[in-house]
Amino acid sequence: MSYLDLTISQMHLALVEGMVTPADLVKEAIAVSKGNKCNIFEATDFENALKQAESITKVDEKDTLLGIPFLVKDNYSTAGVETTASSNILNGYVPTFDAEVVARLKSKGAIMLAKTTMDELAMGGTGTSGHKGATLNPFDQTRIIGGSSSGSCAGVAEGIAPFALGSDTGDSVRKPAGYGGVYGFKPTWSRISRFGLFPFAPSLDAVGYFARSVEDIALLTEILAGHDEKDMSSSYRPVEDYLGMLKNDSHAKKVGYFPSVIKAIPDKKIIASFDKCLAGLKEKGYEIVSYDFPEDLLNALYPTYMIISCSEATSNDANLDGVKFGLKPDQNAKTWEAYMSDARTRGFSSLIKRRFIIGSFSLLAENQAELFRRAQKARRLIYEAMEKFFASCDYLLLPCAKGKPPFIKDISDRWDPNPNFVDNHLGLANLGGYPSLTCPLGYEDGLPYGINITGRQFEEGKVFQIGKDIENLTGLVNATVSKHGEGI
Ligand code: GLN
């Protein structure tokens, strides 16, 4: 049996009881990582990880994360470890400090093993746009694991580590979690400090993470949430006792779903599981509501998200110019414009350049009212419609994706000419800043699919409560590629 295949809480117990040592865990993780073929790693820090593990002689019951290995998406600053966000423009950049979430995990004694591959600068949802090429789905290496937090998801699904940090601007944790058969969570906007997380679109960005049980997600949220004076946007609200809440039954029992999204899903197996899940929840005392969310607003989701996120990205990433960090441009360039153009021409892929063009075009003074401001107004309408939904329902429940993870050969980095809201509905949680959790639901031809729960702002505790009820229905706790049940 592999100890790496345990959840954080189970692994912790094994450490407390002395059945395994942190060094055993890290050695095993290194061995599994070295044999891995899914292109999960940007940079590894195995030597330091092992040194740290070997220095731990005893794990007490209160040290919940001491000696537990984890992975970090490559858009978090990590002191002394190269951090590129899978972009050539940041090749060679070694931060001098840890992102707040990395620091919090390390201060609890968790051991960072490696940085993981991602879609370049977190833009994209396929895990194919990073400078090291596609991250493969461990369940079928000809398919995507999804993105942008690709390597982190694949690493948890593979059983390399029980948890991993990702980031979520539109669905980048919750969509891959569905394709990888693991739990993936983004909290309320501002709930967790983003200090040291490379911004993509700060009005949408959230720290997120993958784990293999709802309990582990709740535990991580307790550790990571809370104000940080280094991030002005982080909330002062007290952090709730999420683990304690999990022991109690939820009093919020009204679940809504959007029939228009369900109708747009062609995969019968996914729909059957979704229906079974609703029926199971009903038996547990939940009330299920079919809610007609305005379809024009669902259709507005993708353009609104794209215009806002690309506009924010083009402005944030203006600092990637080859002057301060990363790739060194042509030293013979005659003008500073030529110097920066060289860095940006060679440093970014075509996907990133296209998004910057969309962003810059939307922000141009003559276009701003028609594009950027209009997108902000559409966002307000979407938010108000979601608030109306939450006035009558406690949760929104929807399948994560419309089918199996696509084949890598079918992926294009081109703008989708016919976007369908069924591919983008998880972005509702970012436009409204809501907490949102993906749970594994079942398997089709050996490929996992998931269900997503979105709750009201700052109601992460309730989201975990219904998540736990769903986990009890599916029995999918601690599922990895080599070891999982059937789900429902
Ligand atoms: N798929 C979305 C995009 O391409 C989400 C990205 C994210 O959440 N970082 O922008």
Image: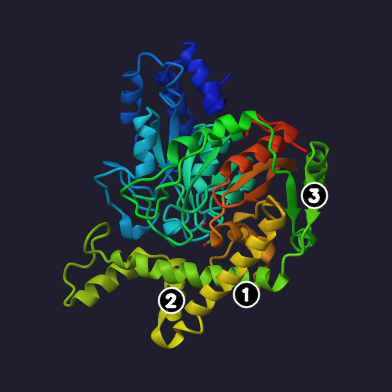
Q: Residues within 10 Å of mark 2 (few under 14, many from 20)?
A: some
Residue 72 lies left or right of residue 390; in this view the side is left
CB contact under 8 Å: marks 3 and 1:
no
Q: Earlier in the sequence, mark 2 or mark 3?
A: 3
Query: Which residue is painted at 79% across and 58% down in the image?
Result: 266
Q: Which residue is mark 2?
A: 357
Give the residue type at disc 3.
Ile
How far across and how far down the image is residue 302, in percent? Answer: 60, 69
Observer-nearest residue: 468 or 31? 468
Observer-nearest residue: 28 or 384? 384
Marks 2 and 1, Cα distance to the nearest angstrom?
17 Å
Q: Describe the element under mark 1 as helix, strand or loop.
A: loop
Residue 333 lies left or right of residue 378; in this view the side is left
Marks 2 and 3, Cα distance to the nearest angstrom?
43 Å
Residue 254 makes an appearance in the image = yes
Query: Which residue is painted at 24% across and 57% down in the image?
Result: 325
Position of residue 225 relative to residue 322, above or below, is: above
Q: Describe the element under mark 2 as helix, strand or loop.
A: helix
Residue 334 lies left or right of residue 67; in this view the side is left
Q: Which residue is mark 3?
A: 288
Q: Which residue is mark 1?
A: 417
How far across and how far down the image is residue 246, in percent? Answer: 62, 32
Observer-nearest residue: 16 or 358? 16
Query: Which residue is painted at 82% across and 52% down in the image?
Result: 268
Give the residue type at disc 2.
Ile
